[in-house]
Amino acid sequence: MTQVLVINLGSTSSKVAIYNQQHCIAEALLQHDIQITQLSLLQQEAHRVQAIEAFLAEHDIALNEIDAIACRGGLLKPISGGTYAINYKMYDDLRKFKYGTHASNLSGIIGFKLAQKFDIPAFIVDPVVVDEMIDIAKLTGVKAIQRKSVFHALNQKAVARQYAESVNKTYTQVNVIVAHMGGGITIGAHQYGKVVDVNDGLLGEGPLSPERSGSLPNDSLYQWAHSHQYSLAEMNHILSKESGLIALCGSNNLRALIEKYHENEIIHLAIDTMIYQIAKQIGEKAIIFKGKVDQIILTGGLANSSLLTDHITEYVDWIAPVSVFPGEKEMETLALRVNDVMNNKEQVNNYS
């Protein structure tokens, strides 16, 4: 029986779980005090480890009883999808924040150090930097700029596999469009097991979301930024954390906003715009398949809203049937894929 510790660290919380084979035997969402989350990420490390150790102690589980550690992948160099062993090279890239700073980097940093201490393997699965995009999806009209692949790879690929299994096929046998809708929204074209085109969800390319701007008119953007003399860091923060529904409605709480949807014209228009832009991105991705799409999949936290999913479906169900897989399957998928590696059902990749 393979026992896997799953670590999925976010900016204000830590998701941890213990899976025995495919069964979750303990899980928790550990919220951290603002005094902790305001520290630099590396300064948070000891506090996060203490919280994980307290969770294990609460459930009478010792780290030396764990067979493997499954970690959410952080910001690394672009790599193909799959399960990767965390080695010194990956640990070093994560710890130095070589490819960007994000709380998810701590998952691999902490997982690797715990694994080294107890002589067990640690892995990441389908990190956000999975890059399987075709060349024509990357090229832009500015020679020095290429589109990047930063998206909800773990959950997108998980629900795509789940759909494929439901129709007795493998992930590599289907063409699906997956829209992950959360604080950021990413919409990927999955062509026979590869995400050949997807919007960059980190800085808001694509639809506007509860927190992100979405794609903007170039001239208006640079004139607005220039007139306010914003720094690069300020622009990054505004476009990724203070735009979208927050800017338009004063809140990123979709559930609360939907309660006012029929009585508040500003909220009504903003949500309708988000729905419209999501549907447009789905339609754009259908071009890649030349219309031969097996399924459109709506997933992520916002997929719990029938108002959103129903309205999006009305726009796009002429392209292909629509399935809704609400929420995220990150913890379950991390455990399942690492369990498959440990039982020689999936090949592990090397990060170099």
Image: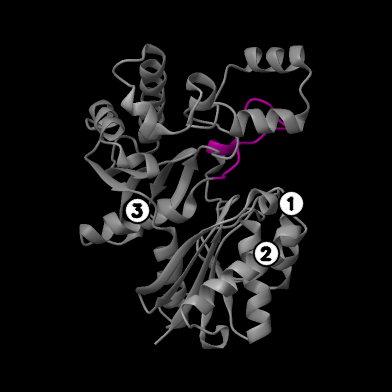
SS type, badge 2: helix
Q: Do the residues labelled 2 and 3 touch (CB within 8 Å)?
A: no
Estimate the x, y position of residue 270 in percent, counting from the top left.
42, 19
Residue 47's tag is: 2
Nearest to N terminus: mark 2 or mark 3: 2
Name the amino acid, label 1. Leu
Above or below 161: residue 338: below
In the rendered structure, the answer to whether residue 347 lies left or right of residue 77 reads: left
Name the amino acid, label 3. Ala
Q: What stretch is highlighted in magenta?
A: 136-150
Estimate the x, y position of residue 306 in percent, counting from the top left.
25, 35
Residue 160's tag is: 3
Name the amino acid, label 2. His
Q: Going 39% across and 48% down the picture, which residue do you hit? A: 191
Total marks shown come to: 3
**Was residue 275 drawn as part of the magenta stretch in this picture?**
no
Above or below 161: residue 217: above
Nearest to N terminus: mark 1 or mark 2: 1
Q: Nearer the viewer, residue 293 or 295?
A: 295
> In the rendered image, which quarter is residue 42 located in?
bottom right
Nearest to N terminus: mark 1 or mark 3: 1
